[in-house]
Amino acid sequence: GENVEQHPSTLSVQEGDSAVIKCTYSDSASNYFPWYKQELGKRPQLIIDIRSNVGEKKDQRIAVTLNKTAKHFSLHITETQPEDSAVYFCAATTNTGFQKLVFGTGTRLLVSP
Amino acid sequence: EAGVAQSPRYKIIEKRQSVAFWCNPISGHATLYWYQQILGQGPKLLIQFQNNGVVDDSQLPKDRFSAERLKGVDSTLKIQPAKLEDSAVYLCASSLRGDQPQHFGDGTRLSIL
């Protein structure tokens, strides 16, 4: 089955810096890769996703890149703000029919003012 | 639109007792998921419904866990008897169809004494 590894486990940056979180997946059949943000005690919220027919997707300060050959994808946050502080999870699944999301172990991002 | 509703938010029970969680998905969402999130880990899929039918329950510990979605809307997840290792947050998610993004509820935090 699918296995997703996520690095780093914690990431501390200064406000205004960029942050990058990386994930690798094992199943070459996976074709859908969402990223979720989870604040303490809150629900995971979908912030961006990418499908395997696209190499990069951007939404304001957030971007995701995908390298199918190397089986890894990354989340990029630019101009970080204190409210970006949270745990970020990547996930991977095949997306033909029914999703069976396999999540990474999470990255705790701390943005200091 | 109203989000995924879950109750209760918190539950404390002793081991070997039983417990039930309730989920009301976003209106019109055909696919419903139950996840278990142990502290410090990403969510792990337990069971997935399409309307009132089970699509995948391969990771559900069926000797103690059960779930149903009788009318294809609300769902309940039950644990009987509970073990210490069941302490976790139980998240419900829903999607319009099986290949669409998943939206999560706030979860139920279960503590086993």
Image (cartoon, coloured by chain):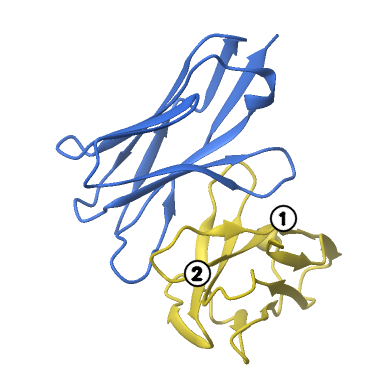
**Labelled disc at residue B106:** 1
Residue B12 seen in the figure:
yes
Check the picture and name the quadrant holding the C terminus of chain A: top right
Q: Alpha carbon of mark 1 to alpha carbon of mark 2: how far?
A: 18 Å
> Which chain is rendered yellow in the image?
B
Residue B10 position, x and y percent, is 83, 59
Residue B54 position, x and y percent, is 47, 84
Q: Nearer the viewer, residue B96 or B91?
A: B96
Badge 1: chain ID: B
Residue A93 position, x and y percent, is 34, 56
Check the picture and name the quadrant holding the N terminus of chain A: bottom left
Q: Nearer the viewer, residue B96 or A31?
A: B96
Type of residue at label 2? Leu
Residue B113 seen in the figure:
no
Residue at 73 percent of width and 74 percent of height: B22
> Which chain is rendered blue in the image?
A
Type of residue at label 1? Asp
The reply to the same-chain question for discs 1 and 2 is yes
